[in-house]
Amino acid sequence: MRKRTILVIGGAGYIGSHANKALAAAGYRTVVFDNLSTGHRRLARWGEFFKGSLSRPTDLSRCFKKYRIDAVLHFAASAYVGESVTDPAKYYANNVVNTLNLLNVMRAAGVKRLVFSSSCAVYGEPASLPMRENLPKNPVNPYGRTKLMMEQAMADYSAAYGLKYIALRYFNAAGADPDGEAGELHAPETHLIPLVLDAASGRRPCISVFGADYPTPDGTCLRDYIHVTDLAQAHLLALRRLEAGGESRAFNLGNGRGFSVRQVIKAAEKVTGLKVPVKLAPRRAGDPPALVASSALIRRELGWKPLYPGLETMLAHAWRWYRKANKGVL
Ligand code: UDP
């Protein structure tokens, strides 16, 4: 039987590379489509590689012509909350215009299955915790708005043109491939865990804690961290559901437990055995105090179950990858 071919857009990035690995391990043929603006060629280690940009629909059409694509996983996006506030034009171009390009090329090519990287940022400041999918969607920053707009566009394309999509609303991706074959490589880095590891290893003088006056138990923000390999597995389950004729819908994806910035720092000290110098800093614009998922729906509907729900495991895998990626520097 012909292997099904999956287009992994953004497969040279952090989450896309792990999903690409999971697809390859599950017997799919994959094609990574990436412009390498933030991704890394060496992270696209599985399947084929096609260098192209979503901003050029002709790149996409060429790719769809070259490979017989059965379904698409779309990871490519700009994903920094703070930057989306200061440079919204970039977010509307990369996340909205480019995704519409993709939807239109998929439509022209007759490809109807799409797994889309959405975000808990579509909810804004939640009225209740843990967050279920039916909470109001009131994003508080342009990043969240672009993700919500694309969910709405996909729903419209689904109703009118027969697109079938699953949107996965990630909480905070963390950790690295347990085999050490992929991990986080952002430049510049803005995410908490890699920055805490920088502070532990002395590559940065300290970690700035953005706000210690939130209405949370220790005053710092609570986030629901989810291992990137568990995220990747959810994509595989979503793809299989679409292949089995599943309907278009959205799922939250987190572990259902909130950890504060201070708890993350403490866990990092334990895992690395190193001291993490801390500096208190003002709140970061666009940060809700607490974001914790209810993943009851995806567990029930897709049978998703995290393999690595522990924060210390995520940090241990991130630390192993960090040391490998920074060999020669540390
Ligand atoms: N954070 C922090 N210092 C940093 C980076 C992040 O205190 O240098 C906090 C941030 O305010 C948020 C949490 O850590 O509450 C997770 O932020 P991150 O940027 O990793 O992910 P996001 O929640 O923005 O997706």
Image: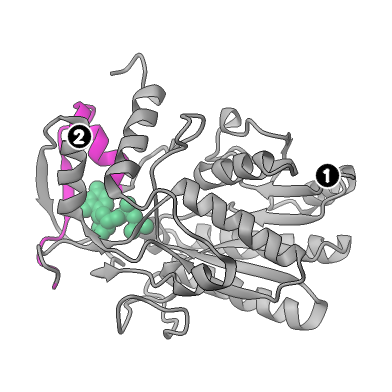
Q: x, y percentage for residue 270? A: 16, 37
Decide: few, some or many residues near mark 1? Use Cα within 10 Å; few <14, some 14-19, many ≥20. few
Tag 1: amino acid:
Lys
Q: In which quarter of the image is residue 77?
A: bottom right
| Residue at which label 2 appears | 199
Position of 83 relative to 186 (above/below): below
Position of 280 relative to 244 (above/below): above
Query: In which quadrant will I find the N terminus?
Result: top right
Position of 256 relative to 34 (above/below): below
Magenta span? 192-215
At horizontal 59% and vertical 51% (from top left) the residue drawn is 76
Q: In which quarter of the image is ligand 1?
A: bottom left
Closest to the observer, 82 or 313:
313
Q: x, y percentage for residue 121? A: 41, 69
Q: Does the magenta stretch include residue 240?
A: no
How is the protein colored in the picture? one colour
Of marks 2 and 1, which one's residue comes earlier in the chain?
A: 1
**CA separation, marks 2 and 1?**
45 Å
Closest to the observer, 98 or 324:
324
Element marked by disc 1: loop
Single out the residue that lies furthest toward the top. Answer: 328
Horizontal relation, residue 110 to residue 46: left or right: right
| Residue at which label 1 appears | 3
